[in-house]
Image (tube, rainbow, N blue to C red):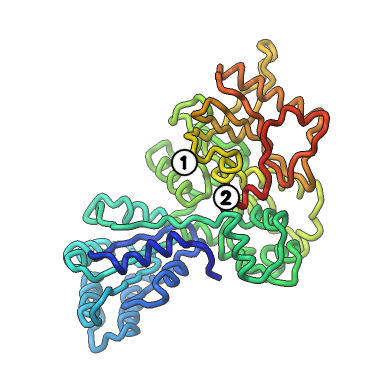
Amino acid sequence: MFVAREQEVQLLRSTIDDEYSQFVAVYGRRRVGKTLLVREGFQYQFTFQHAGLADGGLRDQLYAFSESLRDAGMRDFSQPKSWLEAFSLLKELIRMAPDGKKVIFIDELSWMDTPRSGLITAVENFWNGWASARRDIVLIVCASATSWMLSKIVHNKGGLYNRLTKQIHLRPFTLRECELMLTAKGIEMNRYQTLECYMVMGGIPFYWDFLQRGKSLAQNIDAIFFARDAPLRREFDYLFSSLFKHPSDYLAIVSALARRKAGMTREEILASTSLADSGALTQKLGELESCGFLRRYRAYGKKQRDALYQLVDNFTLFHYKFLADGDKDEFFWEHMTDSGLHNAWCGLAFERVCLEHVSQIKRALGISGVLTDVCSWSCKSDADNGIYGSQIDLVIARRDHVTNLCEMKYARNDFAVTKAVDESLRHKAADFRQLTKSRDSIHVTIVTTYGLKQNAYSGMIQSVVTADDLFAD
């Protein structure tokens, strides 16, 4: 099901009208819709298209490439013995093509890069030595192995350095885009249900495509994740191996972060894993961030080197909470709805969804055009100095000298501020004011599902953002 992605489609189609040849890289995590985007963007019209083999050696990869050349209409050629020979045949195919732009789509390029294969050298030779000197070629390369794409193509320091003319980092859907997908599939879901579905699956279109009409949300989640033959029951096992050639280190990082709600510093990650303190760790953290698994953020008043890393990928969090042990019956989600475990998970998952929709929160607050610093803040208790101890996951410090301290509260009805919540919010504001010495106006902001119930304790809440606001474009 293809919906949204208007800007990405427009960018791809603009390459047809460009005066010169174009070299475009499309990358993003597994299942985010890269291949479908390219196919829809060019309306399935390619001079040549090919997809690498997931587990093939060099001989198998070259054979598959040859078959793609034959599918594109090339005849009477010898089996290439190297990628240089293979791309030389591709040149010949392009020379035989009719006038006009020739769109060349190579999917899962990273899988073609087997040890000592010479693939990157061949791509460099094809583009630098031939295609870029023409005006009629659009070369699209794509891969789910985001780390490979970033190091070998996007940030290549060799012959492909600065050769890309365009790049698309395809990100997961927002809540609004998921809602559009449900409408296109004819599935009736209110926004509360859509929000919970997002808390499970995140914005990965492939996962949402498994939703079926006529089933409740709980029935759908059981069918997709917990049933005996559930299509995504083992998805996590394949997710990291498809993104990273050596996934164990990445899994160690993610597993450590899954145990720490507020996130961890680089030093804390080192202490919680057996990874070496080297530039490789920094690179892996950056790649996980690029794939959308974690966010790197600076605590208020701290320098960038003191950044925290927080696991924010909804599906990964769902996996570690409910799927990792594998000991669940096929109706687990239906039985667990409204339980204490479910409600506790909802609170944490809702916070993550809010952190993925900060731009929508800013729009609801009317500050889209205001320069802001988005961060977190925390402090330990210190009774001697009147410090209660606070954790604020979302602080929006604004250039107009207002700071929003955002408290995310998941609720099934209008959220009611209790005496305990009021006390907690007052303590957080007081701690923040005392320790940061901020001179900004402090606005306590509630981000909740439906709205705020007015009562004796709601007076200190100065702004409210609802789930409807999170569904904004």
Please provide percent x and percent y for residue 339.
81, 50
Please provide percent x and percent y for residue 159.
21, 55
Please provide percent x and percent y for residue 277.
42, 36
Q: Residue at the top extreme?
A: 384
- What residue sits right under mark 1 in the picture? 275
The amino acid type found where label 1 is placed reads Leu
Q: Quadrant of residue 152?
A: bottom left
Q: Relative to the observer, which residue lies in front, 41 or 150? A: 41
Is 425 left, or right, of 33 in this rendering?
Answer: right
First in residue order: circle 1 vs circle 2? 1
Residue 55 in sight from this viewpoint: no
CA–CA distance in space, label 1 to label 2? 22 Å
Q: Quadrant of residue 23?
A: bottom left
The amino acid type found where label 2 is placed reads Asp
Foreground label between 1 and 2: 2
For image coordinates 45% across by 49% down, the residue present is: 290
Q: Relative to the observer, which residue lies in front, 376 or 176? A: 176
For image coordinates 56% across by 60% down, the residue present is: 204
Residue 361 in sight from this viewpoint: yes
- What residue sits right under mark 2 in the picture? 313
